[in-house]
Image (spheres, rainbow, N blue to C red):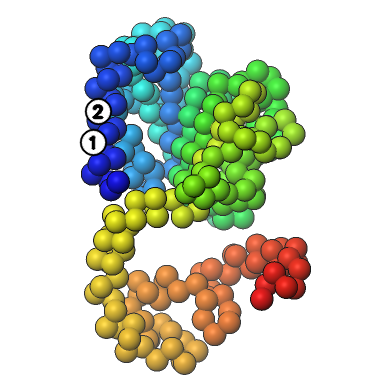
């Protein structure tokens, strides 16, 4: 199957849901999909999601939506969650410049939205200096309070085991993409159990559509090949050897992390310290 086939299947499914909304299996409350992160990954997820019958709802409108029940059966609601919707400082405010300078001063309020969101698509860029949008303690507390609406997390960012969402403690593969997570004790079990959240976390998810992935990647790479072949990679400074795009994409050189990727050092050290020597050969 390629992307065009998948899109056609989703559009056909959308038509069925509009004609027979009862087949959605949920009729007593609105089905809300939260999209965290609206960069390239988030835009791609939204493009596919919009093949279905969707309607946008703002985070501030969720409570009223559930109270009023004024919606068409079979409608899937998309709630777009930007940083300003998800993060607050100690004054319960969000300031773009302050966040850029002091991300550690902010915490996530996504747990406050869990009474309304059934499916979370996590598309955020995450690095250790940023707050987790669904941290372990806050997730467990919300779950214990009865905020158990969340059924599925599609973690497209996929940064296990300590990424932006607590439930991605591991990653699967294209043949075993899902598992269940218990927010109370952090345990993992087989998918679709009781009192758990089903998680899809695959780090090479784009390879699930190999033809599209290969065509897209090769088309973008083609124009850079001549410069890559001509580059003198023995030079310590690659900035004069590679086009800016390739230079920025270079993660390691001569055994060291490039400056823009040195934030990965703690992860690498943790992994190296945890692995027996023979596993690193």
- Tell me if residue 250 comes above or below residue 34 in the rendering: below
Image quarter of residue 54 = top left
Label 2 Cα crowd, 10 Å radius (few <14 / some 14-19 / many 20+) = few
Residue at screen point 34% across, 56% down: 210
Residue 115: % across, % down: 56, 20
- Circles 1 and 2 in contact, beta carbons < 8 Å: yes
Q: Quadrant of the C terminus?
A: bottom right
Q: Secondary structure at mark 2?
A: helix
Image quarter of residue 190 = top right
The circle on residue 274 is none
Residue 170: % across, % down: 62, 48
- Tell me if residue 216 comes above or below residue 226 in the rendering: above
Compute the Cα span from label 1 to label 2: 6 Å
The residue where tag 2 is placed is 12
Residue at screen point 75% across, 63% down: 274
Residue at screen point 61% across, 21% down: 147
User: 106 or 138, which lies in front?
Assistant: 138
Residue at screen point 39% across, 50% down: 208
Q: Is residue 130 visible?
A: no
Q: Is residue 205 left or right of residue 14?
A: right
- Tell me if residue 251 comes above or below residue 190 in the rendering: below
Label 1 Cα crowd, 10 Å radius (few <14 / some 14-19 / many 20+) = few
Q: Secondary structure at mark 1?
A: helix
The residue where tag 1 is placed is 8
Q: Is residue 111 left or right of residue 116?
A: right
């Amino acid at each position: 199957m390629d992307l065009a086939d998948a899109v056609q299947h989703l559009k056909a499914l959308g038509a069925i849901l509009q004609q027979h909304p009862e087949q959605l299996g949920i009729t007593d409350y609105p089905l809300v999909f939260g999209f965290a992160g609206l960069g390239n990954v988030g835009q791609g997820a939204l493009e596919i999601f919009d093949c279905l019958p969707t309607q946008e709802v703002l985070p501030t409108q969720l409570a009223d939506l559930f109270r009023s029940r004024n919606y068409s059966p079979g409608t899937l609601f998309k709630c777009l969650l930007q940083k300003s919707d998800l993060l607050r400082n100690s004054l319960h405010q969000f300031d773009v410049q302050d966040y850029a300078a002091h991300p550690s001063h902010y915490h996530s309020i996504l747990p406050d939205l869990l009474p309304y969101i059934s499916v979370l698509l996590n598309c955020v860029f995450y690095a250790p200096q940023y707050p987790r949008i669904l941290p372990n303690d806050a997730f467990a507390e919300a779950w214990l309070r009865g905020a158990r609406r969340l059924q599925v997390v599609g973690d497209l960012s996929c940064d296990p085991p300590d990424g932006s969402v607590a439930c991605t403690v591991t990653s699967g593969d294209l043949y075993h993409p899902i598992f269940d997570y218990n927010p109370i004790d952090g345990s993992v079990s087989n998918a679709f159990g009781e009192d758990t959240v089903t998680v899809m976390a695959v780090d090479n998810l784009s390879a699930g559509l190999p033809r599209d992935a290969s065509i897209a990647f090769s088309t973008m790479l083609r124009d850079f090949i001549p410069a890559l072949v001509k580059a003198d990679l023995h030079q310590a400074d690659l900035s004069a050897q590679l086009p800016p795009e390739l230079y920025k994409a270079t993660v390691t050189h001569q055994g060291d992390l490039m400056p823009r990727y040195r934030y990965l050092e703690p992860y690498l050290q943790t992994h190296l310290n945890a692995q027996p020597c023979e596993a690193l050969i």
